[in-house]
Amino acid sequence: MERTQYLSKDEIARFTSKSNWLAWRTLLLSWLSLLAVFWAVDTWTNPVTILLGIVLLAGRQLGLAVIMHECGHNTFFKQRWLNQFVGQYLAANLNFADLNNYARGHTGHHQKAGTPEDPDLSNYQAYPVSRASFKRKVMRDLTGQTGYKLLRFVVSRAAKLFSADPEQRRAARPFVQQLLVSAVFAVLLGLLFSPWAYLLWLTAFMTSHMLVVRIRQVAEHAAVPAQFDPDARMNTRTTIPRLWERLLFAPNYVNYHLEHHFMASVPCYRLKPLHQLLAQRGAYNETPIFHGYGEVLRHAIA
């Protein structure tokens, strides 16, 4: 799928142009929406709002992960230093991630998507899976088993700051930073809302967020027409979400994943118009575009 087959040079330049205004708007809306969840739970605290908050925060956490992803590509803001700062301190750290480590691994995914060397292949190669297999995955996510393994890894790596090996101490710094920034975030939430507010964020991260991430991974690359075809239309999927699904599975246009692999230099806030233009020009005439994540799961679960 060649860019110039469907787009002129001027159109490529327009779609790949960065806008600080659109980036700040995306960041502000992401933060306001997550703070709104905390405000609602803090104002009307009861089991129903707490449970709903845990579900909704999973989508807000994915929204921050998308911003980290964009900053890792250096496509969010015009300035590289701004991508580095926002991507690390206002997105990645809050999800116990490191921007630079993520970017290095993600570059390999883009270079080798559609090949057996794709470093992310283990996340989706086994699909379609049986209902029983997927149910076991869901239970591991919702009971916190998946999240616990991730947090245990972060804490164990951060503890190497006290190692006698200087190389291990250096490698531990990003993990220590994640814990420190998360602690600052916990204090901020405690000052703005209830002292226990951060527990809501942590619970969502360890449970509902893990399931949301799994479903996003399935939607992007699982049970695609041809896993090992280099054409993005064969190895990657775009899903058109329902309105409520945008809150959980598709914040910040992450659902337009085929378009992202078609041209990774396009900022997330320009992916939807790119999708519309490519569709008008027949780029997807033989490509299945799924509508709703339920349709994706019915396809990916045998």
Image (tube, helix red, strand yellow):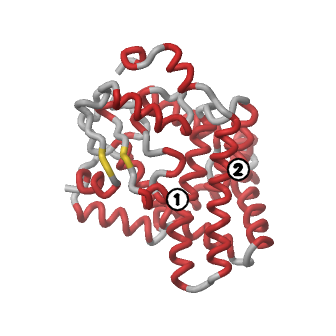
Answer whether residue 230 is visible to the viewer in this image: no
Q: Who's the residue at 41% across and 14% down the image?
A: 4
Camera-side residue: 288 or 153? 288
Q: In terms of secondary structure, where does tag 2 sit?
A: helix
Judge left or right: residue 41 versus residue 162: left
Mark 1 burial class by Cα count in 10 Å: few <14, some 14-19, many 20+ = many
Measured along the vertical axis of the image, is residue 224 above or below residue 266? below
Answer whether residue 42 is visible to the viewer in this image: yes
Residue 297 position in % (x across, y down): 29, 55
Q: Amino acid at mark 1?
A: Gly
Q: Amino acid at mark 2?
A: Leu
Measured along the vertical axis of the image, is residue 46 above or below residue 297? below
What's the CA distance linking mark 1 and mark 2? 16 Å
Q: Who's the residue at 67% across and 64% down the image?
A: 35
Measured along the vertical axis of the image, is residue 163 above or below residue 133? above
Q: Who's the residue at 36% across and 15% down the image?
A: 5
Camera-side residue: 75 or 117? 75
Q: Which mark is residue 48?
A: none
Camera-side residue: 101 or 61? 61
Tell me, yes or no, whether the two marked residues, 1 and 2, touch with CB atoms within 8 Å: no
Q: In the picture, residue 135 is in which quadrant?
A: bottom left
Q: Who's the residue at 56% across and 34% down the image?
A: 267
Q: In the orientation shown, which residue stands out farthest toward the left? A: 302
Residue 279 position in % (x across, y down): 34, 31
Judge left or right: residue 85 versus residue 280: right
Which residue lies under the disc numbered 1?
59
Whichever of callouts 1 and 2 sits on the residue coming sooner in the sequence is 1
Residue 76 position in % (x across, y down): 63, 36
